[in-house]
């Protein structure tokens, strides 16, 4: 099974309302919309205009973009600072770079949950993030192709994982750092992709 650490793809580029009903309205405006029907026997009858409004069952759901959350990059930068304080620069340097990178990406990368799919976009204007550099194709996956997903860890979300069959029939695994509001992310994932085995963020 191929696994892609998807945080290195879109994140390293250079966050239901249902309606149903059937309504019908009959409006008769005698003065304006009277239609005269002449029958075959010469009789005249009047018929009011009938207007029917058929409310289709709506499955459209609002687009959700979870808010950015800076806790993860700040926590990583804190760990880097601790390493630096202990004169362990060999560990402080890569950890610090990771923290800075995630801090930058938190300002620009967004998870966009539309009516049918999850898509990774960038910038305030929610521009497309381009092709996935690891497995190809757009960074957009239909909810109907999700096999399962998890959020680690509920109390302090760090990673979100999901497996989908859109990229390849046998399933493709993705990992993303949680640089979005964990509560919002969890709620919309449950709504659009079904429940996971983990509990929600506290």
Image (tube, rainbow, N blue to C red):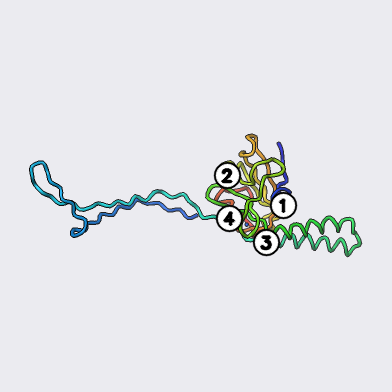
Residues tagged 4 and 2 counted as in contact (Cβ below 8 A): no
How far across and down, in percent of the image, does residue 72 sit? Answer: 73, 59
Residues tagged 1 and 2 counted as in contact (Cβ below 8 A): no
| Residue at numbered disc 2 | 142
| Residue at numbered disc 1 | 13
Of the two numbered discs 1 and 2 in the rendering, the one whose residue sits closer to the viewer: 1
Q: Nearer the viewer, residue 127 or 194?
A: 127
Residues tagged 2 and 3 counted as in contact (Cβ below 8 A): no
| Residue at numbered disc 4 | 187
Which residue reaches farthest bottom? Answer: 85
| Residue at numbered disc 3 | 69
Of the two numbered discs 4 and 3 in the rendering, the one whose residue sits closer to the viewer: 3
Of the two numbered discs 1 and 4 in the rendering, the one whose residue sits closer to the viewer: 1
Q: Residue at x 85, y 63 (%)?
A: 82
Disc sitting over residue 41 in the figure? none
Q: Residue at x 69, y 57 (%)?
A: 179
Element class at badge 1: loop
Q: Quadrant of the N terminus?
A: top right
Residues tagged 4 and 3 counted as in contact (Cβ below 8 A): no
Calculate the distance from the C-alpha at mark 2 to the C-alpha at mark 3.
24 Å
């Amino acid at each position: 099974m191929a696994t892609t650490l998807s945080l290195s793809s879109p994140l390293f580029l250079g966050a239901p309302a249902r309606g149903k009903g059937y309504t019908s309205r009959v409006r008769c405006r005698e003065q304006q919309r009277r239609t005269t029907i002449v029958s075959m026997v010469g009789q005249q009858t009047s018929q009011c205009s009938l207007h029917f409004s058929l409310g289709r069952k709506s499955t459209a759901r609002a687009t959700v973009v979870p808010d950015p959350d800076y806790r993860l990059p700040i926590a990583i930068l804190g760990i880097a600072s601790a390493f630096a304080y202990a004169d362990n620069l060999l560990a402080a340097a890569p950890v610090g770079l990771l923290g800075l990178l995630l801090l930058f990406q938190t300002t620009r990368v967004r998870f966009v949950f539309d009516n049918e799919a999850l898509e990774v976009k960038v910038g305030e204007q929610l521009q497309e993030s381009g092709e996935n550099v690891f497995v190809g194709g757009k960074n957009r996956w239909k909810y109907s192709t999700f096999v399962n997903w998890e959020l680690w860890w509920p109390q302090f979300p760090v990673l979100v994982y999901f497996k989908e069959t859109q990229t390849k029939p046998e399933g493709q695994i993705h990992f993303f750092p949680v640089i979005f509001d964990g509560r919002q992310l969890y709620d919309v994932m449950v709504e659009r992709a079904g429940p996971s085995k983990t509990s929600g963020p506290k």
